[in-house]
């Protein structure tokens, strides 16, 4: 094996940071040295390469040369891989501890109530739940598996459909029994307050506008009604008789079984996004993860069968 020809690594780190910021002072702040030290490291790297990487512009700071641009892009990729490799080495390797990431609403309404059953089946496996609205970076975070809400396009990850999501109207039993304001089909919603979930930056999410259009109902003012930032707040508002909310088969929790909410009519609309199990391909078949994935799929199947039986 030939000897690697590596430049001074401290100089590489300083140059890569300076190339991203195009500013020696900001690069210095990132790697905890002075701007002068960054400049010295960059000069050392240029001397080692025998080629300029920056053009010094006294009035406008620095700019990368064409060679500097190509070299910086390659180094960023290499340093990202080094960071990933280091994170994996430092990650605890206890094989019987699984960390799963999920959105708060899914974790509280679907996953956590079921974890006792998993524990009974696999008492040797400990599950830790991490809640987050953002996508998991498996290379940088101490997460083994995640349940994502999206369209299923996750390159580089083992991806399995967990559940399809359907939206339907729910209200309190008292509201349903009000003879003065019937609630027998979707058109009757014009007599009632609509409870809204305030969802931002999610294109094609099923709002009341989309739901009513899908079931063929027109002429209902959807601009009115209270708005809440979380699903469970909408369900609580509906359960307390404040109006009719949109619920989903995934996030309804035990509201229907407990009688706190009822479905006034059977109409439902499939959402644009579904729930997927995702994890790095390299770890997907490890015994503890494989057992957890299998259990998740079984739970989702059992729920779908129970829903079909109720309809």
Image: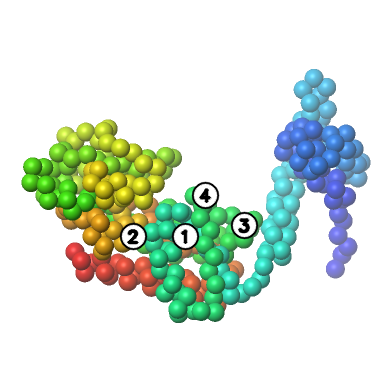
Which residue corresponds to mark 3?
A: 141
Q: Is residue 287 above or below residue 173?
A: below
Mark 4, secondary structure of its residue: loop
Report the coloring of the rendering: rainbow
Residue 39 at least partly seen: no
> Residue 78 or 147: which is nearer the viewer?
147
Callouts 4 and 2 close, C-beta under 8 Å: no
- 127, above or below 46, in the image: below
Structural distance between the alpha carbons of marks 2 and 3: 29 Å
Q: Secondary structure at mark 2?
A: loop
In the picture of the structure, the residue carrying the numbered disc 2 is 253
Query: At x 32% / y 46%, what residue is drawn?
Result: 234
Structural crowding at the residue carrying mark 2, measured as other residues with C-alpha within 10 Å and reported as few (<14), some (14–19) or many (≥20): many
| First of labels 3, 4 by sequence position | 4
Residue at numbered disc 4: 134
Q: Nearer the viewer, residue 165 or 157?
A: 165
The residue under the point 36% across, 41% down is: 228
Pair 2/3: label in front: 2
- Would you place residue 78 above or below residue 42 in this image? below
Precedes in sequence: disc 2 or disc 3: 3
Q: CA distance from mark 1 to mark 4?
A: 11 Å
The Cα–Cα distance between marks 4 and 2, rounded to whole angstroms, is 22 Å
Mark 4: few/some/many CA within 10 Å (<14, 14-19, 20+): few
């Amino acid at each position: 094996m030939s000897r690697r020809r590596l430049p001074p690594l401290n100089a590489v780190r300083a140059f890569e940071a300076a190339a991203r910021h195009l500013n020696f002072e900001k690069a210095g702040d990132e790697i905890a040295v002075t701007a002068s030290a960054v400049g010295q490291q960059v000069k050392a790297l240029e001397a080692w390469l025998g080629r300029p990487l920056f053009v010094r512009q006294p009035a406008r700071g620095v700019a990368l040369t064409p060679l500097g641009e190509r070299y910086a892009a390659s180094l960023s990729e290499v340093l990202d891989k080094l960071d990933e490799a280091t994170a994996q080495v430092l990650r605890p390797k206890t094989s019987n501890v699984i960390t799963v990431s999920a959105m708060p609403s899914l974790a509280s309404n679907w996953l956590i109530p079921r974890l006792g059953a998993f524990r009974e089946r696999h008492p040797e496996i400990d599950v830790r739940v991490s809640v987050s609205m953002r996508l998991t970076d498996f290379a940088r975070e101490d997460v083994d598996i995640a349940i994502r809400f999206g369209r299923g396009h996750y390159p580089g990850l083992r991806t399995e459909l967990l559940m399809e999501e359907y939206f339907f109207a729910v209200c309190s039993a008292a509201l349903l029994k009000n003879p003065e304001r019937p609630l027998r089909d979707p058109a009757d919603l014009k007599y009632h307050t609509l409870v809204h979930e305030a969802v931002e930056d999610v294109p094609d999410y099923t709002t009341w506008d989309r739901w009513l259009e899908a079931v063929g109902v027109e002429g209902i003012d959807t601009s009115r009604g209270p708005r809440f930032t979380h699903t469970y707040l909408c369900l609580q508002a509906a359960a307390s008789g404040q109006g009719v909310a949109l619920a989903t088969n995934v996030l309804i929790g035990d509201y229907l079984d407990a009688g706190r909410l009822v479905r006034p009519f059977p109409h439902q609309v499939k959402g644009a996004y579904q729930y997927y199990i995702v994890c790095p391909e390299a770890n997907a078949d490890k015994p503890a993860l494989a057992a957890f994935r299998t259990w998740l799929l079984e739970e989702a199947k059992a729920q779908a069968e129970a829903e079909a039986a109720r309809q």
